[in-house]
Amino acid sequence: MAVLPILTYPNPPLRQKSKRVRNVDGSVQRLIDDMVETMHYVQGVGLAAPQIGVLLRVIVIELPGEETLALVNPQIVKRSGERTVEEGCLCIPGYRGEIKRSVKVTAKGLDRQGREIRIKGEGLLAQALEHEIDHLNGVLYIDYLESMDKLYKVVVETETPEI
Ligand code: CO
């Protein structure tokens, strides 16, 4: 396993669409393991493969005190509600912005063993699923801001985790 460097905005791969994974083989499992180790190292709650420059549809999420979640080829199949959240991203370190996210999200995809799974998330989990799946489409949370002036710098670490 290895901790990999995280690309920072505006690195071009962050704006590209990632490819679907054809087989959840050993190389994909190694990628997942490296992403989990990297996420732990930077104390993020989620990471998408393009953030480390790998344009494959793979995400990992780990909410504080919860189990690690890995999803290959994730897709949101249902979303409901709307709430305003403060959001940050590991690729845009030190900044936050207020955007709208769904309250509840259902996502499906494949797990580390290639089995189909369905995840129902609420609150921070729903936010992380939307944020990481956006990364696979080259979308960043700053795209939802009215303008870049709405982005603010955080000097002291806030409670808002970066994803
Ligand atoms: Co991010």
Image (cartoon, rainbow, N blue to C red):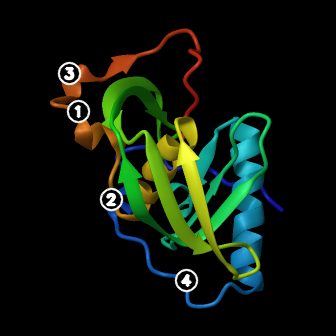
What residue type is disc 2 on?
Arg
Task: State the CA–CA distance, disc 1 to disc 4.
Answer: 31 Å
Task: State the CA–CA distance, disc 3 to disc 4.
Answer: 37 Å
Q: Is residue 50 visible?
A: no
Asked which secondary structure carries label 1, the reply is: loop
Q: Is residue 61 above or below residue 72?
A: above
> Which numbered dot is residue 145?
1
What residue type is disc 3 on?
Asp
Q: Is the distance from the Cβ of mark 2 to the nearest ligand 1 atom less than 8 Å? A: no
Which residue is painted at 31% across and 34% down in the image? 100
Residue on which the image places disc 2: 15
Q: Is residue 29 left or right of residue 99?
A: right
Residue on which the image places disc 4: 21
Look at the image and tell me in which quarter the C terminus lies: top right
What residue type is disc 4 on?
Val
Find residue 26 and report its image quarter: bottom right
Mark nearest the camera among 1 and 2 is: 1
Look at the image and tell me in which quarter the N terminus lies: bottom right
Which residue is painted at 51% across and 52% down in the image? 129
Q: Is residue 42 left or right of residue 158?
A: right
Residue on which the image places disc 3: 149
Q: Is residue 38 left or right of residue 144?
A: right
Q: Position of residue 4 (x, y in %)?
A: 68, 55
Task: State the CA–CA distance, disc 4 to disc 2.
Answer: 18 Å
Q: Is residue 81 above or below residue 29?
A: above
